[in-house]
Amino acid sequence: MLALVDANNMYCACERVFDPRLRNRPLVVLSANDGAVVARSEEAKALGVQMAQPWFQVRHLEKTKGLLAVSANFELYTDMSSRMMAVEARFAPRQEIYSIDESFLDFEGVRGDLVAIGQDLRETVLREVGLATCVGLGPTKTLAKLANHVAKSAERKPGSYPAHLARVCNVGEMSRGDLELIFSATEVGEVWGIGKRTTAKLNDAGVRTVLDFVRADAAAIRKSLSVVVEKTLLELRGTACLSIDDSPAPNKQILVSRSFGKSITSADEIVEAVSEFASRAAEKLRNQGSVAGAISVFFSTSPFRKNDRQHEANATFPLIRPSADSTLLVGTAMEGVRRLYRSGFNYAKAGVMLVDLQEADAGQQGELDLFSSVSGTAEMPRSTGRDRSKLMDAMDTLNQRFGRDSVRIGSATLVSGGSETRSWAAKRERRTPRYTTRWDEMPMVLA
Ligand SMILES: [Mg+2]
């Protein structure tokens, strides 16, 4: 059995942990020079604020409806994510971190009432980290995702599903009849990996609900749509067939991480793994035409191995300007590992997450010509002087033609020291303190 644990409104929830004034009010998080909405609280959704909506279109709601807006604070979100993931990892022998706020847990070999374990997990994350989550359980990833959707909807929209499925839902333990009721109450477009175009095609063929979909002919689905859609169908019928690499990508950030087959202890091995993850993430980033504003690097021991000493390393490095340059991203990730590494631990997993994603052109007008030669992170300035987008294109073309990793970043030399001015870095006028990662920004409690 698998669980998908997902934090509710992650970015807004992180802000609310530290600032109670933001609770129970419509709240949005802005990114891309404070230009667009990247996260909304339930109250903001109720006001009709859309995802990715330009801020100027909803700004009037500040005065009329008490809408609050903060600048994205990715250093805070990624650190809170790392704390949350570490708590979740205690509950199952294997964890696959899927996005900044979602992880799959594999309960193979675990005995006991999984719904009770899920409830315990929720309460523990809430108590220790301050974030509310929903837990979906099922025999395949797609069913666990669907169960999570049910758990979340039953809580947010009473009446959408039976109330007892709110917050923790296990579709693996349902009778056939109950499961079919859930399937018939869910539109096929809600299924993980079924995008808008596939939904439209399925609707045209008369497939509207998940129940219609699971009753469809798998071979016909493969023929008329794709083998990936067929895999999704089989997953909904309970046959696991999605590997990590087929999993549909989360859209808000790009995450590449793996649990290691064996424990890793040396910095070099982590550097090697993390470089590979950063390359892959950078390639995905360019494929979707985005740039990243920051890169987060993490590696940790396994909390499930209780005899091992535990260490979780995690840090986010904001880039001076958003970039999709592999050499920069890999170099930053490698330097990050070197800074965070501590010897004497059995590391069990590592990963890289690109956050603060923006369209490749957004925020680059005007300054581009002046500053296109400058790249690097605020804390790890680099003195490279060329626009490498042509090099990146060439790399991607070679890797597509000759196979993954035909061309790789061999090494990256970082120029350390020296402080770089950030006067022209991204606009974040409403950024909240980095409460959990900066000594001088810790929350103050007045006695
Ligand atoms: Mg979430």
Image (cartoon, grey):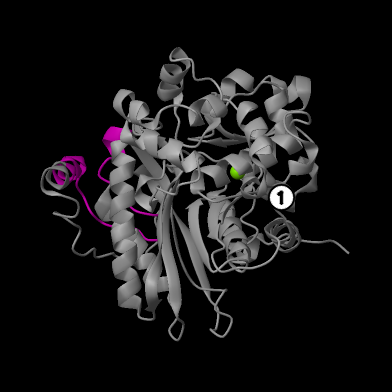
* Left or right of 138 on screen, residue 168: right
Residue 350 seen anywhere in this rendered image of the structure: yes
Q: Where residue 4 appears, x then y in whole percent?
A: 57, 50
- 419 w.r.t. 367: above or below: below
Give the labeled residue for mark 1.
132
Quarter holding residue 332: bottom left
Nearer to us in this view, 372 or 6: 6
- 182 w.r.t. 97: above or below: above
Quadrant in which the N terminus appears = bottom right
User: Could you classify mark 1 by the number of other residues whose Cα lies within 10 Å: few (under 14), some (14-19), or many (20 or more)?
Assistant: some
* Left or right of 296 on screen, residue 367: left
Specify whether residue 373 is painted magenta: yes
Query: What amino acid is labelled 1 in the image?
Result: Ala
Quarter holding residue 67: top right
Residue 387 seen anywhere in this rendered image of the structure: no
The outermost residue toward the top is 204
Nearer to us in this view, 195 or 32: 195
Residue at image point 77% right, 19% down: 64
Span highlighted in magenta in the image: 368-396
